[in-house]
Image (cartoon, rainbow, N blue to C red):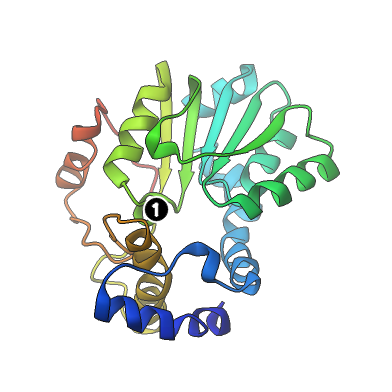
């Protein structure tokens, strides 16, 4: 990831001087390889082993057969893992970045789950075309051009008893040292600038998150959510 991030520094400098940001298309393919390696541990070692069992209502829906969407699905690793574990459910991945969709579709075919997993290019903040029992975002909201619009679109696309699973980076003040340095770097060199390239909010990885859970929940209420349950 690091060499690919360094490769856009000149463009980023110009964006700081003149406005705007660096679009996703400007990054070398090796960046996406590195990003996938960074998140792979979540989906290989935590998704099925800890996260899903920690959400009994979600697990019940998946076992019975649910319509599931992953917004910002990337190369599809999470949905493919879920499709392998819960064959009664059907899964759709949406991502705004076209190259990931083709790769994710090929991976679903290779994994033998293409009959119940599909991938589509979509800017979900502008609307999600179907209703879903479970919608997930994994490390996505803070990158969004329109975070509140995305949260509203997800809320509108949930079925009446639907569940939204939101995972995002915990960048509280305690994240200092090497981890904090990495988060600061990625925030400036990718998360913030790609959002600004689309005229967006530019939250970045390090948008301040209140440590009080009630205050954190206030960020979701304008999007129409009724309640939240923390997993971690």
Question: Can I make out residue 33 in this image?
Answer: yes
Rendered location of residue 227, percent (x, y): 26, 28
Kindly identify the residue that appears in the image at 47 percent across and 24 percent down.
57
Q: Nearer the viewer, residue 81 or 110?
A: 110
Crowding at dot 1, Cα within 10 Å, few <14 / some 14-19 / many 20+, comes out as few
The secondary structure type at the circle numbered 1 is loop
Kindly identify the residue that appears in the image at 31 percent across and 32 percent down.
152
Specify the quadrant that holds the N terminus. Answer: bottom right
Q: Is residue 113 left or right of residue 43?
A: right
Determine the residue located farthest toward the top in the rendered image: 160
Determine the image quadrant of residue 21.
Answer: bottom left
Q: Is the residue 211 above or below the residue 56 in the image?
A: below
Rendered location of residue 34, percent (x, y): 61, 71
Kindly identify the residue that appears in the image at 16 percent across and 40 percent down.
218
Kindly identify the residue that appears in the image at 65 percent across and 70 percent down.
29
Q: Label 1, on which residue?
A: 168
Q: Is residue 103 left or right of residue 170?
A: right
């Amino acid at each position: 990831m690091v060499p690919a991030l360094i490769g856009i520094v000149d463009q980023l400098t110009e964006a700081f001087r003149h406005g705007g940001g660096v679009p996703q298309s400007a990054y070398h393919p090796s960046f996406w390889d590195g990003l996938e390696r960074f998140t792979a541990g979540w989906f290989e070692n935590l998704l099925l082993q800890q996260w899903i069992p920690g959400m009994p209502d979600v697990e019940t829906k998946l076992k019975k057969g649910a319509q599931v969407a992953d917004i910002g699905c990337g190369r599809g690793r999470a949905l493919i893992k879920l499709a392998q574990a819960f064959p009664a459910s059907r899964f759709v991945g949406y991502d705004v970045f076209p190259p990931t969709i083709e790769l994710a579709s090929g991976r679903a075919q290779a994994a033998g789950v293409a009959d119940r997993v599909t991938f589509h290019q979509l800017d979900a903040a502008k609307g999600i075309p179907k209703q879903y029992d479970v919608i997930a975002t994994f490390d996505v909201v803070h990158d969004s051009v329109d975070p509140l619009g995305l949260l509203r679109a997800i809320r509108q696309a949930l079925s009446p008893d639907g569940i939204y699973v939101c995972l995002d980076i915990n960048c509280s003040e305690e994240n200092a040292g090497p981890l904090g340095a990495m988060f600061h770097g990625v925030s400036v060199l990718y998360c913030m600038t790609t959002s600004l390239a689309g005229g967006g909010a530019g939250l970045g990885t390090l948008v301040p998150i209140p440590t009080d859970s009630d205050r954190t929940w206030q960020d979701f209420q304008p999007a129409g959510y009724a309640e939240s349950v923390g997993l971690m």
